Image (cartoon, helix red, strand yellow):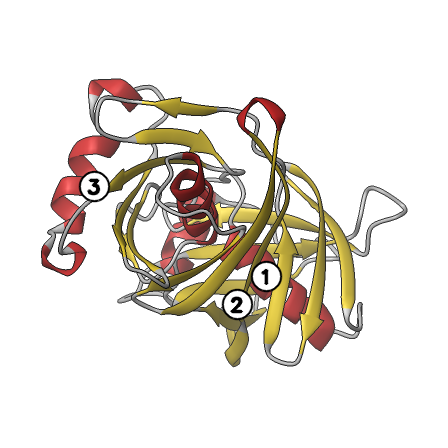
Amino acid sequence: MVVKFYKYQGTGNDFIMIDNRSKTFKNNTKTIKWLCNRRFGIGADGLILLEQPENPSDDFKMVYFNADGNESTMCGNGGRCLVKFANFLNIIDKEASFTAIDGKHQATINNDLVSLKMQNVEGITTLEDAYFLNTGSPHHVLFTKDVNALNVKEKGAAIRNSSLYKKEGTNVNFVETFPEHLQVRTFERGVEDETLSCGTGVTAVAIVAHFSGNTNKHKVAIETLGGSLSVSFQPAANHTYTDIWLTGPAEQVFEGEIA
């Protein structure tokens, strides 16, 4: 079967997009892993299916797979790219409502910037030298100096596979603070390597930075290897964070067909 696909990227986090409203693409772990392979397939950090909404108030449904071929938890940059894809397909104009594995999301498009509303964060765990929280996907966040000098793949893999996260694993974020922004490098589970950017990761980092006192801002500028993102939020009682928005660029890179 010939599959029509589109390639999108959001601050270097890249995704294969398939319009699957007709259900012609059948989910298969081996096939998805092959499509995401950068040497033998198309190459991507993940594959996303745009499907018919199950909720009548939604514009579409998001189904996300990691590069290892397994369906995964929420992907923030992937969600932003999918909104841009839905706009390209004329499903939406400047606003979107859709459901992903972690629930309902709202989004807006302003020129090349896509803003995605994330789920509320209701629990942050303080560890010995780091923090853990779930922003649609699980994230381990630790602050460091000279983040550019780190071997993120080696250190991230060690934490991801440690006894602390042995059952399900986690994403790992290394953060350096600067007066006007945070710099972040992320090891992603499922990709099992450093990625140029991670949307749920930078969301986690912004919230932890406020929670830990590393910033008093409610809108945080974040630099990743792939580009600039911002995260805005409102702190609430009992260390809860609401009205969380992830904003950054998203663009179509190319389209094609693969048999």
In the rendered picture of this protein, how many numbered marks are placed on residues? Answer: 3
Q: Position of residue 14 (x, y in %)?
A: 43, 65
Lower sequence index among marks 2 and 1: 1
Given the image, on which type of amino acid does mark 3 rest?
A: Gly
List x then y, in percent, for residue 144: 18, 45
Mark sitting on residue 248? 2
Which type of secondary structure does the marked residue at label 1 adopt? helix
- Along the horizontal axis of the image, is 151 left or right of 206? left
Q: Amino acid at mark 2?
A: Gly
Residue position for label 3: 156
Front-lying residue, 160 or 247: 247
Is label 3 or label 2 in front?
A: 2
Do the CB atoms of the residues marked 2 and 1 lie less than 8 Å apart? Answer: yes
- Residue 14, compared with residue 257, is above or below; it is above
Q: Where does the N terminus fall, quadrant-wise?
A: bottom right
Q: According to the image, label 1 marks what residue? A: 80
Label whose residue precedes the other's in the sequence (1 or 3): 1
